[in-house]
Amino acid sequence: MSNVYLVRHGQAGTRDSYDSLSELGRRQSRLLGEYFLSQGIEFTAAYSGTMLRQQQTAAEVRTTYTEAALPFPEIEIDNQWNEFDLAQVYREIGPLLCDEDPEFHSQYEDMRREVRQSAGVHEAQVHRRWRPCDTKIVDAWIAGRFPYSGETWSQFYQRVAACRFKLSGPRDVNILAFTSATPAAILTGLALDINDGRVRELAGVVQNASYTLLRQRGEQLRLFQFNAVPHLTAPGLRTHR
């Protein structure tokens, strides 16, 4: 039975430049690496999505091992671990949902105005909190309510679910995967046998630089820890976006 550590990337940038770690995100990721070291955890394989924020998180963890002169596996970069494209969902579904739902339209325009006003200020709340319009548009994408040229929810789910076929290994090996909130929630959902709506709710609580521990035997996943942050000991270090 292999031990699979699913790591969500550290805190990312602002909404208009999300695919890179903030300084806090780098610190969170480094603290995670130091925690793994303190627990004597050695990894036999490591994966990362192709997104910059995922790879930067992986690099910070790897650096802690390198500086301690301890081995760390080559990180296999694989886009199956990527998050869905929220920006494309907004571009294509946003105008259609605005036409149908005046409340969404108002919430969406308020968010866009705050993004412009924040001018890249990392601490601005618009960049750090999930808004009602985010929930509405993701729910519309999951339900397939509007035409969309990108990856559907079903395609995304199946892409991520297929990652589990890469994770089997000899007994008690530790495998590390740097990913994002929704992929971590999908694989957790497979272990718990829960539906799509609950998966989105799981994704909404996954903290930056947290890890989820699954154990896999063949294709069967079992959940042992979810959304763990023992390395983020101060409240100011714990973030969701």
Image (cartoon, rainbow, N blue to C red):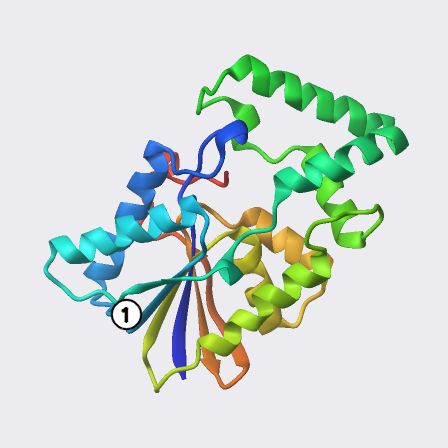
- Of the residues shown, which amino acid type is indicated by label 1? Phe
Q: Nearer the viewer, residue 230 or 44?
A: 44
Provide residue 65's location: percent of width, then percent of height: 18, 58
Specify the quadrant of the image occupied by residue 169: bottom left
Provide residue 236's location: percent of width, then percent of height: 37, 34
Specify the quadrant of the image occupied by residue 78: bottom left
Q: Residue at x 52, y 62 (%)?
A: 80
Element assignment for label 1: loop
Q: Nearer the viewer, residue 193 or 58?
A: 58
Badge 1: how crowded within 10 Å, few (<14), some, or many (20+)? some
The residue under label 1 is 43
Q: Residue at x 52, y 31 (%)?
A: 128
Residue 65 position (above or below residue 240): below
Provide residue 154's location: percent of width, then percent of height: 72, 62
**Residue sitting farthest toward the right:** 100
Q: Residue at x 68, y 58 (%)?
A: 198
Q: Nearer the viewer, residue 24 or 94?
A: 94
**Residue sitting farthest toward the left:** 69
Provide residue 127's location: percent of width, then percent of height: 53, 28
Q: How many marks?
A: 1
Query: Image check: 38 left or right of 218?
Result: left
Specify the quadrant of the image occupied by residue 36: bottom left
Q: Nearer the viewer, residue 107 or 47?
A: 47
Q: Which image quadrant: the N terminus?
A: bottom left
Residue 231 position (above or below residue 169): above
**Residue sitting farthest toward the front:** 149
Query: Image check: 18 left or right of 112?
Result: left
